[in-house]
Amino acid sequence: MLEYASYALVLFALGAYLLLDGYDLGIGILSLFDRSDRRRTEYNELIATAWDANESWIILAAVVLWAGLPGVYATVLPGIYLPLVVMLLAIVLRGSAIEIQSSAPGYRRGWGLVFGLSSLVAALCQGLVIGAVLSGLPHSGGVFTGGSFDWLTPYSALSALGLTTVYLLAGAAWLQNKTVGTAHHRAGRLGRPLLLAVAAASVILGLGLPLADPQLFRFDQPLRATLFGLAVATAVVCWAIAWYGFGRRPDWRPFAAVAGAEAAGLLALVAATAPVVVPPDLTVHVAASPQGSQLFLLIGVGGCIPIVLAYNIYAWWVFRRKVTQPPARTDASGPFDTTAATKQTAPVSQALGDYPRAVVVARRVLLTLLAVAVAAVSQDVFGGVGTWIGPTGIVVCSATALAAWIRSDRRAAAAGEFDLRTAEK
């Protein structure tokens, strides 16, 4: 029975990640559709207080899955290498954008764009992974037997769009809870259209699951049918509460309702599919590690979860109040002015070189694609080409990237970009 405790820990960690980092990603995506630099600054500062703690849950879920259910890890990971690698790169870029934007004087639109796009890419990749697993990855005897792009199915594409919509809804609910002014009103207006989109996505994905999932659902079992019905009913009630709460006080009600709906949706999915983890036939019992490993894992993770929860709760308590954006200190007479912040950083741009915008964007896109290609080939995503980039090649590429990073930081420091005293003058 210890394997089911490990399964429960994986579900708990994944649920916590989808809830916590979900609103993070949703706010990042919403920033792409907001033209106000001031509101974008608010979004970034709101996320900067907790994004690292929120993402710790996905690490915990990966550790439990690797040690507690190695059969699932060995079957799923080779089948989703490409979207998983892209997701991890997007998360790294997103974290860098948040911290650099938070430390920079004024609003940097380039890093703001990186923040929004990386949030969108991470959300889409997570949806692709979930949809691919639910569609059933080809495997035999605990070994993945499919191709490099078997993760791309119609159902996984719909799952990517559906999960992104859920994240947008969670982001809007969190913005209503934590902001004031125009950002608060904007979140209240977005809530109900996003609720309709989530309802439509839930119906489509729910009806499409029996067609995409090769396993046989046993709703003739009374306990399974009862749990599934209760979870769906709870999700519908939470949806109705969120519908009523958007645009009305108390501001915390929509986010609490959205969180309840997400938890109920996850429980409904588990009630429909358990104990199968990877369709059509890989169950929790078959994929589990030996009992001694299970016990060691549960003791270790059991000691970590209270620490992670305490960290999250402490961060929520410290930043429990609404976020307001203070006016920028440009001069003694003028209010917040984004043009002044732009003018303030003009010498930095000149010092770094007046490159055409298209050249800068193209260079960043090519560097990102190169990093993805190196990671994909080194992990043998495409099959049979893993020897192209061995350990020596990875070291050379990493050292080159590190040297380019250090050189860029030195140029920025020479231009005064990191001198906060200069930025405040």
Image (cartoon, rainbow, N blue to C red):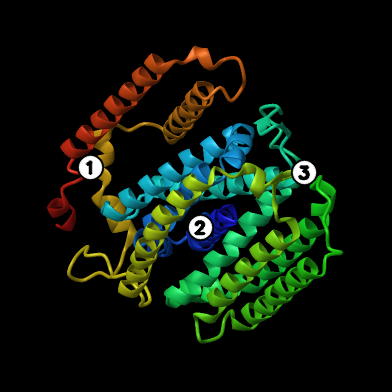
- The 10 Å Cα crowd at callout 3, few under 14, some 14 to 19, many 20 or more, is some
**Cα–Cα span, label 3 and label 1:** 60 Å
Horizontal and vertical percent position of residue 188 = 56, 76
As drawn, is 336 to the left or to the right of 152?
left
Q: Nearer the viewer, mark 1 or mark 2?
A: 2
- Residue position for label 3: 280
**Cα–Cα span, label 1 and label 2:** 46 Å
- Residue position for label 2: 13
As drawn, is 326 to the left or to the right of 71?
left
- The 10 Å Cα crowd at callout 1, few under 14, some 14 to 19, many 20 or more, is some
Would you say the residues marked 3 and 1 are in contact, meaning their CB atoms lie under 8 Å apart?
no
- Residue at disc 3, secondary structure: loop
Horizontal and vertical percent position of residue 181 = 44, 77
Q: Is residue 377 above or below residue 165?
A: above
Q: Earlier in the sequence, mark 3 or mark 1?
A: 3
> Can I make out residue 38 in this image?
no
Q: Earlier in the sequence, mark 3 or mark 2?
A: 2
Q: Is residue 279 above or below residue 409?
A: below
Tell me the quadrant of the picture where the N terminus can be found: bottom right
Residue positioned 55% across, 39% down in the render: 84
Residue positioned 68% across, 73% down in the render: 235
The amino acid type found where label 2 is placed reads Ala
Tell me the quadrant of the picture where the C terminus can be found: bottom left
* Residue found farthest to the bottom: 249
The amino acid type found where label 1 is placed reads Pro
Residue positioned 59% across, 38% down in the render: 83
Instruction: Give the image quarter of residue 234.
Output: bottom right
The amino acid type found where label 3 is placed reads Pro
- Residue position for label 1: 347
**Cα–Cα span, label 3 and label 2:** 24 Å
Q: Earlier in the sequence, mark 1 or mark 2?
A: 2
